[in-house]
């Protein structure tokens, strides 16, 4: 067992309970045994005691949208819109292989863990024919870091010659993509409550996927009982594409092909009108909000206040490391708050709402809210202890405000199912220098191959 004591605690439970000085007791089963103010009345013999003085304990952060392979192509197409950025990078991504993806995923997930992330999804949709088992490579990387992982088996089957955006050599045959997706579910998906690995179905976007693939992917996911994910309503270019190709908006298209529902979460949702937001709320369709990536690509800012007010599940995502080089999920809390306030003023979002987006909001998007996203007895012990008594945070008495408004905080302890993955700002299960060197070699090999 592990007892964190003498810490501020933000439970993010339905009642918003917080303790200026409190504790969290983690059981041997990897779940939260007790949480409260002051000190616990009894501590079992042999319990590891962790002094949380000067720290804030929160649920672990949940990353709801990412492309880990992009760690190998950071710093490119820095001044392009989404479509220009994709056009530049697609040919490079066509040279990916399992070794490169594994190295990129290890670096990306290690960095995410150091930023307070305990659960991450990944949206992988590039499968070169001679690239090996890239999905297995990133799954192994997640295991090596120790984070909970929700990779999605993505796909693209609409190439440039057929009216899509990707070049011909990076797309798959429709039937092959569907068969490979089902095989990935059968091989990897674990639906158990304490699962460390779940698969979702994730055709890439309306401008890179045929209508047939969108429709049959939805049918496949529901037959298998897994979730659905795709990019939607990210840019004006996408809106124009959907109106030209399908005669409707992106959300109207999603509804037409069976992609609205409480088993779906959509990446970005920047360009949504009132009708679209109402449809998402009525159907329980989630949105992965990626404020830094949206800003980096000049895509716009999502209407998060309106989404929340309509009951839409909203989580945070760092997005791919090539469209958001920082990839720091803890810092995304502040970016989400600032983005909301840039649209609606200082009342549009507060620090606790930002923290909810990064925790229980993300758990809702991934279908894990029963077990993740808040510090409650019986839930999985995925939590983070943030150091907030140093120069950058000292003097901000409200610890949640210090975490969100202040500079990125050091993670003193991160647990996943009660197992440490970060301690004193260092990875427990992997060496950061080794991850860096592997990623550096992968980047150089990928770039030099062109």
Image: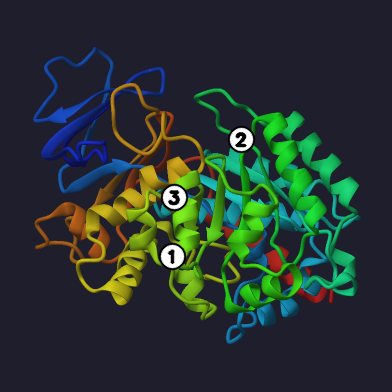
Residue in front for this viewpoint, 445 or 214: 214
Task: Look at the image and tell me in which quarter the C terminus lies.
Answer: bottom right
Q: Secondary structure at mark 1?
A: helix
On the image, the x and y values in percent for residue 398 come to: 12, 55
Residue denoted by label 2: 198
Residue positioned 52% across, 70% down in the render = 324
* Labelled disc at residue 151: none
User: Residue 48: horizontal and vertical position, in percent?
Assistant: 28, 25
Q: CA distance from mark 1 to mark 2?
A: 33 Å
- Going from N to C along the chain, the mark reached first, 3 or 1, is 1
Q: Quadrant of the N terminus?
A: top left
Colouring method of the image: rainbow
| Residue pictured at 65% horizontal, 64% vertical | 70
Q: Residue at x 63, y 49 (%)?
A: 259
Quarter of the image holding residue 3?
Answer: top left
Report if residue 21 is visible in the image: yes
Residue 427 in sight? no
Q: Name the residue that disc number 1 marks.
A: 274
Name the residue located 34 percent from the left edge and 60 percent from the top edge: 333
**Label 2, label 3: how many angstroms apart (C-alpha)?**
25 Å
Give the answer, above or below, for where 59 lies relative to 163: above
- In the rendered image, the residue lying farthest to the bottom is 79
Q: Position of residue 348 (x, y in %)?
A: 25, 66
Of the two numbered discs 2 and 3 in the rendering, the one whose residue sits closer to the viewer: 3
Q: Residues under labels 3 and 1: Cα distance? A: 11 Å
* Residue 419 placement: quadrant: top left
Rendered view: 396 above or below 376 = below
Mark 1 or 2, nearer chain start: 2
Left or right: 47 in relation to 257: left
Q: List the residue tagged with mark 3.
A: 281
Q: Earlier in the sequence, mark 2 or mark 3?
A: 2
């Amino acid at each position: 067992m592990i007892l964190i004591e003498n810490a501020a605690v933000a439970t993010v439970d339905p009642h918003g309970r917080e303790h200026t000085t409190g504790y969290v007791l983690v059981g041997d089963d990897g779940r939260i045994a007790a949480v409260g103010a002051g000190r616990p009345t009894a501590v079992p013999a042999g319990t590891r005691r962790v002094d949380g003085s000067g720290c804030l304990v929160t649920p672990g952060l949940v990353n709801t949208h990412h492309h880990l392979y992009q760690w190998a192509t950071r710093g490119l197409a820095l001044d392009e819109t989404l479509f220009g950025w994709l056009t530049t990078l697609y040919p490079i991504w066509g040279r990916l292989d399992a070794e490169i993806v594994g190295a990129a995923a290890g670096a990306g997930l290690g960095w995410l863990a150091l930023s307070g992330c305990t659960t991450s999804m990944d949206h992988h949709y590039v499968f070169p024919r001679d690239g090996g088992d890239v999905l297995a490579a990133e799954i192994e990387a997640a295991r090596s870091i120790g984070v909970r992982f929700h990779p999605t088996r993505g796909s693209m089957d609409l190439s440039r010659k057929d009216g899509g955006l990707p070049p011909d050599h990076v797309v798959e045959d429709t039937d092959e993509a569907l068969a490979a997706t089902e095989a990935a579910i059968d091989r990897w998906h674990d639906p158990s409550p304490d699962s460390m690995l779940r698969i979702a179905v994730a055709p890439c976007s309306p401008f890179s996927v045929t209508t047939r693939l969108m429709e049959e992917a939805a049918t496949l996911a529901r037959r298998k009982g897994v979730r659905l994910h795709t990019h939607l309503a990210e840019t004006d270019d996408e809106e124009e594409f959907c109106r030209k190709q399908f005669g409707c908006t992106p959300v109207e298209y999603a509804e037409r092909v069976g992609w609205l529902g409480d088993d779906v979460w959509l990446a970005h949702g920047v360009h949504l009108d009132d009708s679209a937001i109402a449809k998402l709320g009525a159907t329980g369709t989630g949105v992965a909000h990626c404020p830094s990536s949206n800003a980096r690509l000049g895509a716009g800012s999502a209407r998060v206040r309106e989404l929340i007010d309509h009951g839409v599940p909203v989580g945070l995502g760092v997005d791919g490391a090539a469209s958001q080089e920082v990839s720091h999920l803890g810092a995304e809390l502040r970016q989400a708050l600032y983005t909301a306030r840039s649209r609606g003023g200082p009342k549009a979002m507060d620090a606790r709402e930002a923290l909810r987006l990064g925790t229980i909001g993300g758990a809702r998007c991934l279908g894990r809210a029963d077990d993740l996203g808040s510090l409650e007895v019986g839930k999985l012990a995925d939590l983070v202890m943030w150091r907030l008594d140093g120069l950058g945070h000292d003097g901000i008495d409200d610890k949640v405000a210090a975490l969100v408004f202040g500079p990125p905080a050091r993670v003193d302890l991160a647990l996943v199912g009660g197992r440490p993955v970060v301690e004193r700002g260092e990875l427990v299960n992997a060496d950061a220098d080794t991850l860096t060197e592997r990623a550096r070699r992968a980047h150089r090999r990928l770039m030099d191959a062109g």
